[in-house]
Image (tube, rainbow, N blue to C red):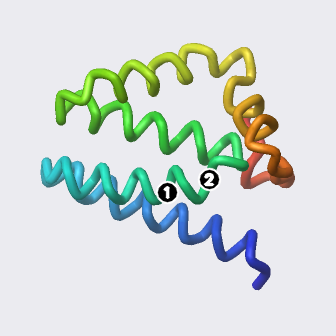
Amino acid sequence: MDDTTHRLQACQTALAEGRALAQQQRWAEAHERYRAAHDLAVDCPRLHELAHRHLQQVNWQRRQLKEWAIDTTLLVLSPLKSFELVAFFMKRQVLGGQVCARP
């Protein structure tokens, strides 16, 4: 298994853990897991967007309004390829393949 595959699996695991914690309303812990997923997925637009969707909900619950506004802005700009632009400006290669492609 290559590093990219391992990293993307770790991201998906962190997202699943965050969802379980959010269902229990353990917002701080859910935020920690979603943030870990986010940091693993910045160069994968589909997973990066998914992480922000989850972070948006948790940041609202935690009343972290600045972070919620950033999440919301990125999500609103998503049709304009905001997540692809972030990946580009991070100067990382945007990962290819079906796992990262957005519909």
For the residue marked with disc 2, what is the amino acid? Ala
Kindly identify which residue carries mark 2: 41
Res 11 label: none
Q: Residue furthest bottom?
A: 1
Q: Residue at x 70, y 34 (%)?
A: 86
Q: Is residue 94 left or right of residue 18?
A: right
Q: Is residue 86 left or right of residue 52?
A: right
Q: Residue at x 74, y 77 (%)?
A: 3
Toward the viewer: 98 or 26?
Answer: 26
Residue 12: x %, y % from top left: 53, 62
Quote the CA–CA distance across marks 2 and 1: 6 Å
- Name which quarter of the figure residue 84 lies in: top right
Q: Is residue 95 left or right of residue 28?
A: right
Residue 9: x %, y % from top left: 60, 70
At mark 2, the secondary structure is helix
**Label 2 with label 1: CB-CB less than 8 Å:** yes
Residue 69: x %, y % from top left: 39, 19
User: Local crowd at mark 2 within 10 Å, few (<14), some, or many (≥20)?
Assistant: many
Q: Residue at x 19, y 47 (%)?
A: 27
| Vertical arrangement, residue 69 with respect to residue 27, above or below | above
At mark 1, the secondary structure is helix
Q: Residue at x 59, y 59 (%)?
A: 40
- Tell me how many marks there are: 2
Split into 4 quadrants, where in the image is the C terminus? Answer: top right
For the residue marked with disc 1, what is the amino acid? Ala
Residue 95: x %, y % from top left: 82, 53
Q: Is residue 70 left or right of residue 89?
A: left
| Vertical arrangement, residue 41 with respect to residue 45, above or below | below
User: Local crowd at mark 1 within 10 Å, few (<14), some, or many (≥20)?
Assistant: many
Split into 4 quadrants, where in the image is the N terminus? Answer: bottom right
Res 37 label: 1
Q: Residue furthest left?
A: 25
